[in-house]
Amino acid sequence: MRVRIIAPLVTLLPVIVFLLNYGLFQQPLNDVLERDNRNQVMTARAHWRWYVDPTVLVYDLQGASGDATGVDVVRAFLQFAYRQKDRHFDRVELAWRGASRFYVQGGDFAELGRQYPSRSPVDTIPILPGMLYRPNGSKAFSTRPGTFVEQNQQRLLDFTSFINTWVSR
């Protein structure tokens, strides 16, 4: 009797996990990518880490055309963060074709989402590098001393490095 119950459950479990991830993350991401014509220069996936770890969300860029700019990539990410702003994660991994390149703390991701309606992606560019971590847990970019202008110039260089590392075409 137990075998009759367990076998269908084992068969259905991957389907349930896929549908849960699709409904919670992939469908909202698809909506973000489809509703804004500027986002059609990229493809992405979103799901829990290993599809079953609800503490970590994976935002996985699958492709970006040669026309995609760093602002395009970040805008789509921020729009998705806005859609997910009420969900709680320990961290959100930024992956490229399945390979994690960076992550942001879950609280920072939620804050980016909450601020999206009132802050343009261009305004977010200087602060984003300071929120990034490498997969090993180290800060991706250090804060350097200097004047406000010098720090902003360095943040823009850090942002360019971030985009070039994340989106390895």
Image: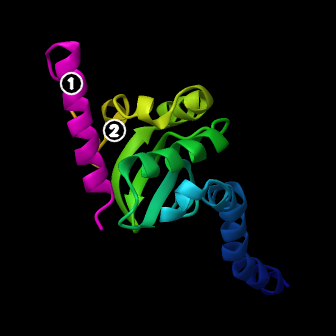
Residue 38 sits above or below residue 139 on the image: below
Residue 7 painted magenta: no
User: Which segment is the magenta one?
Assistant: 143-169
**Image x and y of residue 62, in percent:** 44, 68
Image point (43%, 29%), residue name: 123
| Residue 37 visible in rendering | yes
What secondary structure prevails in the magenta region? helix
Separation of residues labelled 2 and 1 (CA atoms): 12 Å
Residue in view at x 25 percent, y 24 percent: 152
Q: Can residue 44 be seen at all in this image of the molecule? A: no
Residue 137 placed where, x, y %? 29, 41
* Residue 104 image point, x, y percent: 41, 39
Q: Do the residues labelled 2 and 1 touch (CB within 8 Å)?
A: no
State the residue position of label 1. Answer: 143
- Element type at marker 2? strand
Q: Nearer the viewer, residue 90 or 74?
A: 74
- Position of 5 with respect to 97 (left or right) is right
In the rendered structure, which amino acid carries the disc numbered 2?
A: Leu
Q: Which quadrant of the figure has residue 15? A: bottom right
Which residue is at the far right? Answer: 1
Q: What residue type is labelled 1?
A: Thr
